[in-house]
Amino acid sequence: MKKTLKLLTLAFLGIATVACAPAKQMAKMAENVIVECNPSVLEVVAGQINADLNVTYPDGYFHPKAILEVTPVIVYGNKEVEGTTLYYQGEKVKDNFKVVPSDGGTVAERVRFAYQEGMEDCYLELRGRVGYKGRYVYLPTRKVADGANTTYMLVKQDGLVPFKADNYQEIISMTEEGQILYTINSSDVRSSQLSSQSIKDFQAALDEIAANERKTLAGTEIVAYASPDGGQRLNNTLSERRAGSAEKAWSSVTGKRDAGDPVVSSIGQDWEGFQELVSKSNIEDKDLILRVLSMYSDPAVRENEIKNMSEVYKELKGEVLPELRRARFIANVEFKNYTEDELKALLNDNINVLDEEALLHVATLVDDLNKKVQIYNQAIDRFGSDRAQFNLGAAYLEAGDLSRAAREFAKVKAQDADLKNATGVIAMRNGDFVTAANCFSAAGDEIGNANMGIIDILNGNYAKAAQELANVPGCCHNTVLAYILTNQLDKAKATAHCQDPKVKYLLAIIAARQGNVGEMNSNLALANANADLAARAKKDVEFAAFRR
């Protein structure tokens, strides 16, 4: 009985050995199988690792009745992630896997993995087993790719939301004026005009300029005119004579004041002044008058029409035209506004003297969020400033308070590109890239494009991002990154003008790709001031070839 069992056991083992022989042979010949992985250094794009495998089986390798199972595996640290198992069969297997003929052939596959933190320091290997008649033999593990490039993850995702600009002027140009009026067709200066209220106000202004340390007299002018109801040639001559008589009267008007020598000019017919006075008048048909007169480009025709109209509309003859027979005395003044130090002092001492533009400007001079909020609320409460309302939202956004920023932006009245862009940045920071992209597209300006570039980098649309980020002010980091991702290394290097550690890290990547070890090391040394970048550099596949 024991002898019989022994013979049966040996027979069974013999059959099993025969059954496994083709599988063992394929395992033994596995080194003859050519495996190409593209890229050989894995790359993370939009949170995914994709790699194309081309596997070439030699003639005589694949047994007609064999089944081959191949599992791609990402190994990183003490972890590993298995991809989808790939199945192949010989020509005589009645299944639905890819067929590999016995005389050899090449199969192409794409393997996919979702990126997980730590995978930047990894490798991709293929694990397989061959089955024949229900029995399996494991193949030697084949390593096909090293590391995973995560350079795109260096993108700055905060987004750009510039504050609304103020119109604060350190030097304000202003004018002070007085005038003398002439009678029709006359260039004589009447003594009554030299003592008119207009001239007295002009003299008082000159005195105030001299006494005010913030004001500087930048120059003076005399400008003479004629009313547009006479002939053009006559009026030009009359205007010139009025300029001359006004210049002679200048010393009487200015007296001993240091008013300098005025620049004297003659305008001739004062058509612009006529339009302005009529538009401000109470004449019932003023819009009709201006519309009709504007139809005539020929000054002679227009003069005739003005004469005709002045007979119908007595206000033209008695109130408008006499005001245009004049000479203006002009003082050009430069007013020195509050300095930055004075503005900051007034925040505590007398904030109520600051107008809207001064408030918007001084807010740019302080860093404290609470102080900014106080300033913007002043501008909102006192002037109904919509720009201050927007900037209040931008201040909270800059401080990272997204919910408060959103509430303040919701109060902004101007539904402009700036607001659309700000709404998109909040959505982007909250991870809602679809809404963010829609907002940036609706904004349609340079800042919207720059922020859309961030979305496109995150989504793997590098070429589009490089176009969107090109030449955008304040986007040095992301523009450099976009050029690196599109392998435009010279452009990337030329654009890297910012001096922060993150840009130095990008410069180190550029140098590594160009094989410039000295520049790589010097830029890494500067980037290592940032502890996170120093830690990243130790694992970054960009520098793998230079590690000892």
Image: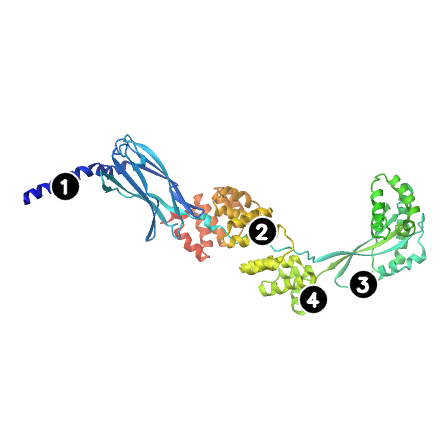
Mark 1, Cα crowd under 10 Å, few <14 / some 14-19 / many 20+, is few
Residue 368 makes an appearance in the image:
no
- Closer to the N terminus: mark 3 or mark 4? 3
Single out the mark in the foreground, 2 or 3.
2
Neighbour class for label 2 at 10 Å: few (<14), some, many (≥20)? many
Circle 2 residue: 421
Q: Which residue is mark 1?
A: 13
Q: Are marks 4 and 2 in contact (CB under 8 Å)?
A: no
Mark 3 crowd level (few <14, some 14–19, many ≥20, 10 Å Cα): few
Residue on which disc 3 sits: 208
Q: CA distance from mark 2 to mark 3?
A: 47 Å
Could you say which quadrant of the image residue 136 lies in? top left
Tag 2 near tag 1, CB within 8 Å: no
Instruction: Kindly identify the amino acid type of the residue bearing the numbered disc 3.
Output: Glu
* Residue at numbered disc 4: 352
In the image, is residue 487 above or below residue 183?
above
How many angstroms separate mark 2 from mark 1 (CA)?
74 Å
Examine the rendered structure and indicate whether residue 101 appears above or below residue 371: above
Which element carries disc 1, helix, strand or loop? helix
**Position in image of residue 169 (x %, y %):** 70, 57
Q: Amino acid at mark 4?
A: Asn
* Cα–Cα span, label 3 and label 1: 119 Å
Mark 2 touches mark 3? (CB < 8 Å): no
